[in-house]
Amino acid sequence: MALTLQDVEHVARLARLRLSPAELEKMRDQLSNILDHFQMLQQIDVSAVPPTAQVTDLVNVLREEEIRPSLPHEQALANAPEQQDGMFRVRAIFEEE
């Protein structure tokens, strides 16, 4: 399935990636190849294969609950690139472009 450059630009915009024209072309080729492989996989008859959510047995690994002191506030913020009012300051995720 050959993707267009517009398809790749759209996906890159959704992923908030800035790609050069050369990178867009490379991604177009690579993503098109991946989709071709998925189309090939869709031709395999899996009607006799039962639905599977997990292929291995799941075992919860739990430790005993133990009350202990948490990390001091100052130490938690010690390496934060930006702080404000005693909290981590991060860049907004949904900024307008």
Image (spheres, grey):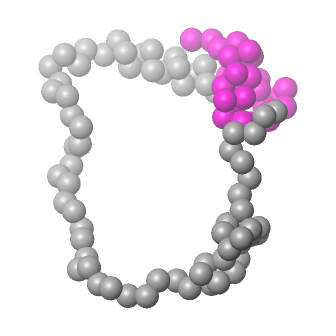
The image shows residue 11 at horizontal and vertical percentages of: 66, 25
Picture layout, residue 73 above or below residue 91: below
Q: Nearer the viewer, residue 70 or 17?
A: 70
> Within the image, what quadrant is residue 47 found in?
top left
Image quarter hosting the C terminus = top right
Question: Magenta segment, which residues?
Answer: 1-29
Main SS category, magenta section = helix
Left or right, 94 with respect to 56, comes to: right
**In this picture, is 91 found above or below 31?**
below
The x and y percentages for residue 30 are 64, 27
Which residue corresponds to the image point at 54% horizontal and 25% vertical from the top-left? 34
The extreme bottom residue here reads 69
Q: At 69% across and 80% down in the image, what residue appears?
A: 78
- Residue 50 relative to residue 35: left or right: left
| Number of numbered callouts drawn | 0
- Residue drawn at point x = 29 percent, y = 84 percent: 66
* Residue 52 spot, x, y in % from top left: 21, 34
